[in-house]
Image: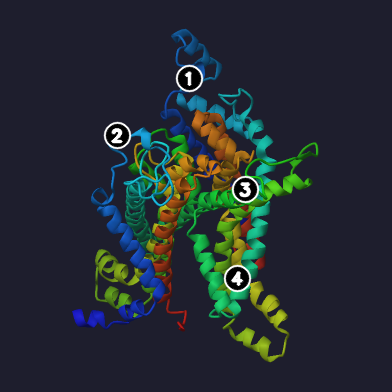
Amino acid sequence: MNRRFFKSKIVHDYFHDPSAIVGSFLLVIFIIGTAFAPWIAPQNPYDLEKVSLEHFLTPPIWMEEGQAPFLLGTDDQGRGIFSTILYGCRTSLIVGFGVVLIAGTFGVTMGLLAGYYGGTFDSVTMRLADIFFSFSTTLMAFLMLGLFKQRGVLIVILAICIADWVRYARTMRGSVLQVKEEAYILAGKATGAGDFRLLIRHLLPNAIPPIFVVMAVDLAVVIMLEATLSFLGVGVPLTEPSLGMMISIGKDYIYAGMWWLVVFPGAALFFLVIGINLFADWLREELNPKIERRE
Amino acid sequence: MFAYITRRLIQGVVVLLAVSFICFIIFIYSGDPVISLAGRYATLQEREEVRKAFGLDKPFYVQYVRFIANAAQGNFGKSYVSRVPALGLIMERFPATAELAVSAIFLAFTIGVGLGVLVSLKPYAFRNRLIMTGSLVNISMPTFLTGILLIMIFAVYLRILPPFGRGETVDLGFWRTGFLTLSGIQHLLLPAFTLGMYQLAVLLRLTRAGMREVLTEEYIKTAWSKGLPPRKVIFKHALRNVMIPVVTMTGLQFGELIAFSIVTETIFQWPGMGNLLLTSIYEGDQPVIVTYIMLAALIILSLNIIVDILYAFLNPKIRYE
């Protein structure tokens, strides 16, 4: 089993595609960095006792006025940029994986049922999906948070999920409609397998591969969306670290030439997202039998 | 066809009602506007007066029905902050947003589709790999970051473009335009590019994928073997079939465009509807927020119906019954 896995096509392709390796490498670095943030970060930027205003707006360490623990400088509150980035990416990843998990589970279930049963349930679900899709996840989440006064990480996750499940439901339904006609499903039906067994044992595992691509792309989109919402001040509360909020604070200082407040959190966000996108691109080509690969 | 259009229109109205209902529920349960209206230190009696003046003392369903009846006549209530009709406040900002959005779509469409065709012809050429890498960078960069970086480069370091505002505008009576002055165009460049960037990459990738599939079709081989010039094969035979999903996507992505216009307008302090919406959210000015949402819903739904009908005309295979 193990040896077969390591000799399989997908593993072979993975090690022969630089973008897949670079992408997953970046993602792993970010996950390790954020998981061990309390040990890696020189300072806990949200512990009020450790932060002092006397270090505010310090430039990065290699510049003239740089100071020892603040590798990438500090912001207007004296929080170290490097430390805040580590904690901010943590919020990004929590929101990202939270949405992928919640919206993904709900969307896949809806798509599976709609594709399998068809009829009224299908047309109502898909009509609803069309509407959510045209309003777009970004606009829906923004408006929901705008109307809703409470702030919190979980609220951001739910606001994004409201319209985000549609991506999964649509893809899943399309995939189910294709798989449904396969001979082995008909054979299962003919031998008297129940609906539940057909759905879980036969349709779900065979229809799910395209969902992995959607998950990867969605993770990148959601992380950018969380940053955007926090940038606009409707995302996570001020007490939580967030890359979007760091950039929002920093944008007022760019005219004074204090570029490090924007450039470092921006770069962190960019490398996190591009890592996921590189991996998603590889996954898409790998799982799409239509496109011939040529290297 | 007629029955189909009628049904879509009825569905549209139902969705609008649902949107208004959801807005209203959140509106009612998201804190008492009277406190922000009358001020924190108002007496109980003053608060009651404010409550009566804005009709906030009536039960929920009365407020809702009255809201719907008024909305149908274009009356969405008065802004809590500036005390003028919310719809007027938003419509005043409409030209600025419309000009920004149209310029962004134009940039995204011409550059995106153009590059998409170019790349699809030789997908593995070095130059085209470079373009695809660029589009990946573009897709991985959130709009607000693009905007701030553009300001840093072009306004703070190079000092060749203005960082915010709309510049000089010309009043045409019903429409205030920035297209007619040099300063208006200069001010438009960075925000339009920022807003267009996201769609540009999406359109590029969609065109490239579509072209790659279409170029392997039999009828394209036939066109080549007939000896048609490349220009005709590519643009007349291939691109035409790719354009259907591309145009549909542009229409359906309008919600996304509206959302990103809020971001862009905020960064560049562009005096449009999105900027107003964000200010209203900070100030808790619910009538303006609700009006904005209803207006956005109306625009998005109408556009969807138009795209669906156009689709039926473009693609004779589809029959709506």
Residue where numbered disc 1 is placed = B34
On the same chain: label 3 and label 1? yes
Which residue does the image show at 55% across and 78% down from the upper left?
A: B126
Dot 3: chain letter: B
Relative vertical location of residue A10 with respect to residue A177 in this rendering, above or below: below
Of the two numbered discs 4 and 1 on the same chain, state the one appearing first in sequence.
1
Say which amino acid is labelled 1: Val
The answer for how far apart the CA atoms under marks 3 and 1 are is 43 Å
Say which amino acid is labelled 2: Leu
From the image, state whether disc 2 or disc 4 is nearer to you.
Answer: 2
Which residue does the image show at 63% across and 35% down from the upper left?
A: B90
In the foreground, A148 or A11:
A11
Q: Badge 2: few (under 14), some or many (20 or more) residues near its Cα, within 10 Å?
A: few
Q: Position of residue B70 (x, y in %)?
A: 61, 29
In the foreground, B12 or A254:
A254
The answer for how far apart the CA atoms under marks 2 and 3 are is 36 Å
From the image, state whether disc 1 or disc 2 is nearer to you.
Answer: 2
Residue A48 circle label? 2
